[in-house]
Amino acid sequence: MSQSTFKRNAHIAYFKRCLAVLPQAAEEHDVNRVTIAFFSLAGLELLGALDRTARDGWIEWLWSLQAADGGFRGSPIPGPGHIPSTYTALCSLALLRAPLDRLDRSGLMRFLRACQAEDGSFAPSPGMPGAFQNDTRMSYCAAVTRAVALRGGGSGGRIEDIDVDAARAFLGRCRTWEGAYASRPGVVEAQGGTTYCAVAALSLFGRVEENGETTRWIVQRQLGGFQGRPGKLEDVCYSFWCCGALAALDRAALVNSPANTSFLLDAQSPIGGFGKAPTDFPDPFHSYLALAALALTPAREELGLKAIDAVWNLPPDARDYLLS
Ligand SMILES: [Zn+2]
């Protein structure tokens, strides 16, 4: 384990600052807002510091994002639902333990069906042209959303499912000659983040076909921390994407954890949070994913972090809350 001290209190202060600069006002346009809220809430939860006594404003704001098409938007401005915003809104509601009586589970599935293209991929929003956005990230967020939709069983009747076989086939076509996954079919180079999304989505859709090639490609991405592609530098977010994918493949034991933990702790900022690598300025995305990566290591308990379900990218109790 690294000599670096875990800067727990600084990380708590960092995520609280991120939430404080996110106004909950209805005129806010920024679709990244719900994503930054999720990273900050989830970071505080992993640190055991999420204060649910002041949650009502956040919960009302999250419900204001629910769109008529059944998905969630990234901002309260009227418009279509958006698959990644739907994923982060659902996760945030679970982290806050929001009463889910307003959740339209059959609407979630209707929304996913409207986003699914004939080739099995998902557009970010219904009727959105341009297949270049239909990537493994959308498939992953759709797979989590579908799991949430199915668990509730709808209002009395059965929910008509998406085309799961087509969704799986699309992900299969994203697999490259290297054995890992690119963002979409035809993209030559596999990448750690898109590999995580594909493996986790396939796991949620039933099973991952793996003959050892995906595992080998991911394991070869470890330098100390992980790189996203061959020839690239380490970046803390790939410690989560790569170790999360290995955990989803039941191969987490292949990680050199002391080296990975050491790299992650070295990327802590003195003001709290994590940059993408040591000496980089912190941002909410890398700060949360670094903590999530640390939560997947054997150092987790020593660091006082909550456990995480690698496939859902949520603590198991938050996952179960969405499925209850
Ligand atoms: Zn990164």
Image: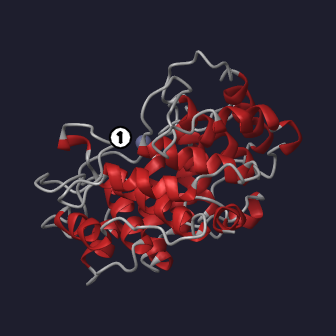
Q: Nearer the viewer, residue 318 or 62?
A: 62
Vertical placement of 75 versus 236: above or below?
above
Q: Nearer the viewer, residue 268 or 65?
A: 65
Going by the numbered disc 1, the residue's amino acid type is Ser
Q: Position of residue 280 (x, y in %)?
A: 50, 31
> Which residue sits at x=69%, y=64%?
300
Residue 178, located in which quarter of the rendered image? Answer: bottom left
Which quadrant would the C terminus be assigned to in this image? bottom right
Q: Position of residue 269 (x, y in %)?
A: 63, 34
Vertical placement of 49 versus 324: above or below?
above
Vertical placement of 89 versus 64: above or below?
below
Which quadrant would the N terminus be assigned to in this image? bottom right
- Judged from the image, the secondary structure of the residue bearing numbered disc 1 is loop
Vertical placement of 155 versus 57: above or below?
below
Tell me if 68 is positioned left or right of 215 in this view: right
Q: Nearer the viewer, residue 24 or 107?
A: 107
Residue 113, located in which quarter of the rendered image? Answer: bottom left
Q: Quadrant of ligand 1?
A: top left
| Callout count | 1
Q: Which residue is most to the right?
A: 53
Q: Which residue is mark 1?
A: 125
Residue 224, located in which quarter of the rendered image? Answer: bottom left
Tell me if 53 is positioned left or right of 204 in this view: right
Residue 207 makes an appearance in the image: yes
Q: Judge the density around disc 1: few (<14), some (14-19), many (≥20) Cα neighbours within 10 Å.
A: many
Q: Nearer the viewer, residue 284 or 66?
A: 66
> Which residue sits at x=27%, y=73%?
165
Residue 228 makes an appearance in the image: no
> Which residue sits at x=75%, y=49%?
98
Q: Which residue is most to the top?
A: 27
Q: Position of residue 40 (x, y in %)?
A: 66, 39
Q: Position of residue 83 (x, y in %)?
A: 42, 46
